Image (spheres, rainbow, N blue to C red):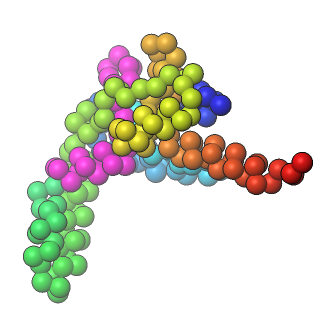
Amino acid sequence: MKVGDIMIPIHEVPSVPVEATLTDVARLLREARCREPDRYPCRAVLVVDSNGRIVGKIGHLSFLRAVSQATPSASGRAVASQAPATHSSFLEQTLAECCECAGRVEARSAMVPDTICIEDTDSIPAAIEVMVHHGTLSVFVRRGGTLVGLLRLADVFEAIAQRLGQEVTAPSA
């Protein structure tokens, strides 16, 4: 089994223009989750430039990192210093600020560039090594120099789990 056998084709991954806001990204991720209930939900959105070229992706972690950096009072130390009676209202205020900031942060400043790539002919163990080394939940897949897909950790897990299930249920000779 190769990466190309389990990747998500690039045209099936939602995309936003570089000037879209994180509010737009959140909406697309929620829509993708509801669209395909039998499949692991898409946890990344592609970011495209004005020519339609893919320049990066925004996943849950990069989304939260960008919102956190844009939110003035999103500091763990500030939460820890609050008295228990005001702790809840502080968290609600911070969440409201995070949501407000998401509408001001553009995709271009939150995206992870398309520099971490593997080939569609790479083995699954090679893909796992790249994902673990870079600490990412998905990597771009190329065929030659062209982006053709996105390999997600969930897809790798599912392929392994299916194989393990076949081995467990296979009759012994």
Q: Looking at the image, which residue sits at the far bottom?
A: 85
Using the image as rendered, state which of residue 67 and residue 166 is in the foreground. Answer: 166
Residue at 12% x, 83% y: name it. 83
Q: Looking at the image, which residue sits at the far right?
A: 173
Using the image as rendered, state which of residue 170 and residue 86 is in the foreground. Answer: 170
Residue at 17% x, 50% y: name it. 69
Task: Measuring from the top left, give residue 171's x and y in whole percent.
Answer: 87, 51
Looking at the rendered image, the quarter that the N terminus falls into is top right
Task: Measuring from the top left, give residue 164's x and y in whole percent.
Answer: 69, 50
Magenta residues span 49-70
> Does the rendering let one see residue 14?
no
Question: Is 7 displayed left or right of 118 in the figure?
Answer: right
Using the image as rendered, state which of residue 27 and residue 157 is in the foreground. Answer: 157
Residue 65 magenta-highlighted: yes
Above or below, 91 against 143 in this view is below
Question: Is 9 displayed left or right of 107 in the figure?
Answer: right
Residue at 62% x, 52% y: name it. 37
> Does the rendering let one see residue 85?
yes
Q: Looking at the image, which residue sits at the far top?
A: 144
Task: Measuring from the top left, give residue 30's x and y in whole percent.
Answer: 46, 51
Above or below, 124 against 157 in this view is above
**How many numbered markers are drawn?**
0
Residue at 57% x, 42% y: name it. 155
Residue 156 magenta-highlighted: no
